[in-house]
Amino acid sequence: MSANSEVEAVYQQVIQRNPGETEFHQAVKEVLVSIEPVIKKHPEYVETNILGRIVEPERQITFRVPWQDDKGNFCVNRGFRFEFNSALGPYKGGLRFHPTVNASIIKFLGFEQVFKNSLTGLMMGGGKGGSDFDPKQHSEYEVMRFCQSFITELSRHIGPNTDVPAGDIGVGGREIGYMFGQYKRLRNEFTGVLTGKGLEWGGSLVRKEATGYGLVYIVDEALKDAGKSIEGATVLVSGSGNVAIYAVEKVHQLGGKVVTMSDSNGFIYDPEGIKLDTVKQLKEVERKRIKEYVSIHKKAKYTEGSDGIWNIKCSIALPCATQNELDEKDAKALVKNGCIAAGEGANMPCTPEAADVFIENKVIFLPGKAANAGGVAVSGLEMAQNNQRTAWAFDKADSELKNIMTTIYENSKTAAEIYGKKGNFVVGANIAGFLKVANAMMAQGLV
Ligand code: NDP
Ligand code: 2IT
């Protein structure tokens, strides 16, 4: 079987086995196409059906989450934890609480996590979980009871050497706290079973900032490599959650100016530069909508919906909200307006067509697996600190993060060059991530 037909056969089987799971199909296709040249060079991966095995999660756990709301109603949501691949270490990846969560979303996220975690160079397998519960619609105590119920069931499947969840959309420090507390009661053990913990009880400095900072570190590295800089650049950011906020913070520290942020209702444009203190107060403290920003900063403009955010002139675009939020027409508008770099803070925020537009037009395009790996990297550092019962200083964790992002950049760049795709970081990141996982699976036998 040729590499092309092998890849096609695996892709067709994925479609057949996972009907209707379009996000998962999309994520698998991107990786399979990228690694075709590797498969051509290494027939042993075909002989041992590495591809067929790597696209199948090791374990898929789906469960009922019963909980009681403030009025006493008996409510139920669906919980997920897909343990995708443990070749490189315990399953590791976030939990997403959002009404759109379903099997396809969790599967695509878990699949990407495997290669992302491989790129960090740390000992972490890949997994993802979550629920269709929407924390934004519920009171503080409802969120607490939901988290307690969710982890009561999940606790039988996870552990500090088995599977270590963390946050993602809708799961931040508050939710991690409630889940950690309940896990501790159930097990009578204080272990690093979750990352993103509070700093007083086992969390790592820089974890909160890590995804956003890491994104900007790798974009900065790529720009420097091309003789350019973030300093003085106008930057568009979407989202106003954990990743977006700390991406904005780092861009501003490096002398760039972010002019947009958004949430699922709409976006703000502040030509003078986003005042991040206002956004942190609105989003992290008061849990309000981004549109409130314009009642405080009168020169800023609010637009309902997301249409138009990528039409604003900029030199760098950082989508940090959710999957498929930036499509072909958005990418074309960015190119037309002189955008020179795009970095995916979110997971799979650019459609495949948008990614192609960037690559064809020589826009530096850093895919999520590489660009947003800083979060899980510092989660890995949190696990290391927990194992040693120690806590590092901010500067130590931050410089480790910077080193990891630089290494991811170098490894992705080199892999792309070796396989004849110079400058294509999608191919480079996928190949570099894949090789380590595939080789570990080969070494471990029929796993
Ligand atoms: P948060 O919940 O903190 O923030 C998510 C942001 O995206 C919010 O502004 C939210 O708006 C917006 N958003 C969510 N869903 C949609 C949607 N369907 N349409 C439009 N806007 C939406 O999550 P994070 O910042 O942690 O995550 C953002 C992205 O980054 C996700 O893709 C996540 O998988 C990825 N990521 C996160 C990491 C982390 O460490 N947290 C690590 C690596 C990747 P609203 O509040 O209105 O819902
Ligand atoms: O998508 C991601 O990498 C995350 N949500 C972070 C996962 C983690 O375990 O820190």
Image (tube, grey):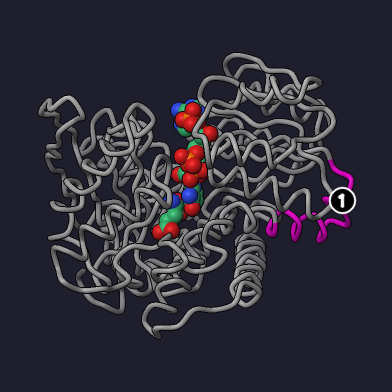
31 shown above or below 201? above
State the image coordinates of residue 259 (x, y, percent, origin top left). 76, 32
The residue that disc 1 covers is 231
Residue at the location (13% across, 63% down)?
186
Residue at the location (48% across, 55% down)?
35
Which image quadrant: the C terminus? bottom left
Depth order, front residue of 176/62? 176
Identity of the amino acid at label 1? Glu
Which secondary structure lies at badge 1?
loop
Q: Residues within 10 Å of mark 1 (few under 14, many from 20)?
A: some
Residue 348 in view, yes or no: no
317 shown above or below 194? above
Q: Which residue in the rendered view is the most extreme toward the bottom? A: 388
State the image coordinates of residue 196 (x, y, percent, origin top left). 43, 60
Residue 440 in view, yes or no: yes
Q: Which residues are magenta?
A: 217-233
Q: Is mark 1 within 8 Å of ligand 1?
A: no
Q: Is residue 260 left or right of residue 210?
A: right
Number of labels in the image equals 1
State the image coordinates of residue 52 (x, y, percent, origin top left). 27, 54
Depth order, front residue of 287/12? 287
Residue at the location (37% across, 46% down)?
5
Q: Quadrant of residue 409?
A: bottom right
Depth order, front residue of 77/12? 77
Q: Quadrant of residue 337?
A: top right
Q: Is residue 70 left or right of residue 235?
A: left
69 shown above or below 298? below
